[in-house]
Every structure is written in C-alpha cells, then in structure tokens.
Image (cartoon, rainbow, N blue to C red):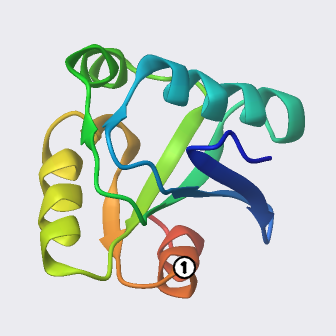
Amino acid sequence: MDTGRIKMENFKGILYCDAYMNDEFTLDDLESMREEIRKNYAPSTDVILKKSGSYSVSAEAQAKLIKGIKEFRNFVYVADVKVKRESAEYAATFYMKPYNTRVARTKEEAYTMLSEKY
C-alpha cells in the first residue's frame, strides 16, 4: 500500500514502511500504519520504518505514540544518513521508547535486530 507519503509492504512477515514525505508526520500517517497492521498483520506486530524523506513528527503524533499504540510491538528505524540517524535516535529515546525502538542502517540489519530477543 502506498499513501503518497508512506509506502508499506510485507518484509518477511514484518511491516516495512518507507516514509518518504518531506513535511510533517501526522496523526493521519500514524493511522494509515495502524490500519495496515489491522488489515494484514497480527494485532500487535513488529515494524521497520525507513526514514527516506525529511520530516518532523507532529506534537499530536508524538503524544499519541507516547501513550502507546497497541498495534506496535517492537520498532526499528532505518536511517543511513547522520542527520536522519540522530533524529531516529532522539525518537527512540523519547516518544518511541514504549516500542523497544532501535536504529539500524539497513532493512536487513533491522530485520536481524527484530529476530533477536529484546
């Protein structure tokens, strides 16, 4: 599925998202990911999100993520550029902390992280 902002696909049974928007990640974007999980995955699933675009996460989306998204189990960002990696590390420390969030350089590395015990 492609929303025009996030491309979502199955990668070895895990939801893989390529967030390529260049503005702000919103509650609508978050809901699109949740809807994809509800339609095609277990009630709570692991997620890999590649930060292809250059975007910020809205305050509303951050607040919702801090409270907890029942559809997200474990979460790994893929960020291969320094500034995107730093942004992902910040998110992992703060509003993405409930999902055992980690940061990888490649999709394959992210999959390996999710395959290991947290």
Picture residue at 54% right of the left edge, 82% below the top? 112
Where does residue 85 sit, x and y in percent of width and height? 21, 70
Q: Residues within 10 Å of mark 1 (few under 14, many from 20)?
A: some
Q: Is residue 116 left or right of residue 85?
A: right
Q: Is residue 1 left or right of residue 20?
A: right
Instruction: Report which quarter residue 60 is drawn in.
Output: top left
Q: Quadrant of residue 52?
A: bottom left
User: Eyeballing the image, is 90 above or below 117?
Assistant: above
Quadrant containing the C terminus is: bottom left
Q: Residue at x 36, y 84 (%)?
A: 105
Tell me: 79 left or right of 86: right
Instruction: Return the x and y of residue 34 as percentages of the image width and height.
Output: 64, 28
Identity of the amino acid at label 1?
Answer: Lys
x and y percentages locating residue 71 in the rendered image: 61, 29
> Which residue is label 1 attached to?
107
Count of marks, rendered view: 1
State the residue in front, 89 or 19.
Answer: 19
In the picture shown, does residue 65 fall above or below 20? above
Q: Secondary structure at mark 1?
A: helix
The percent coordinates of residue 4 (x first, y second) are: 64, 43
Residue farthest toward the right in the current orientation of the protein: 40
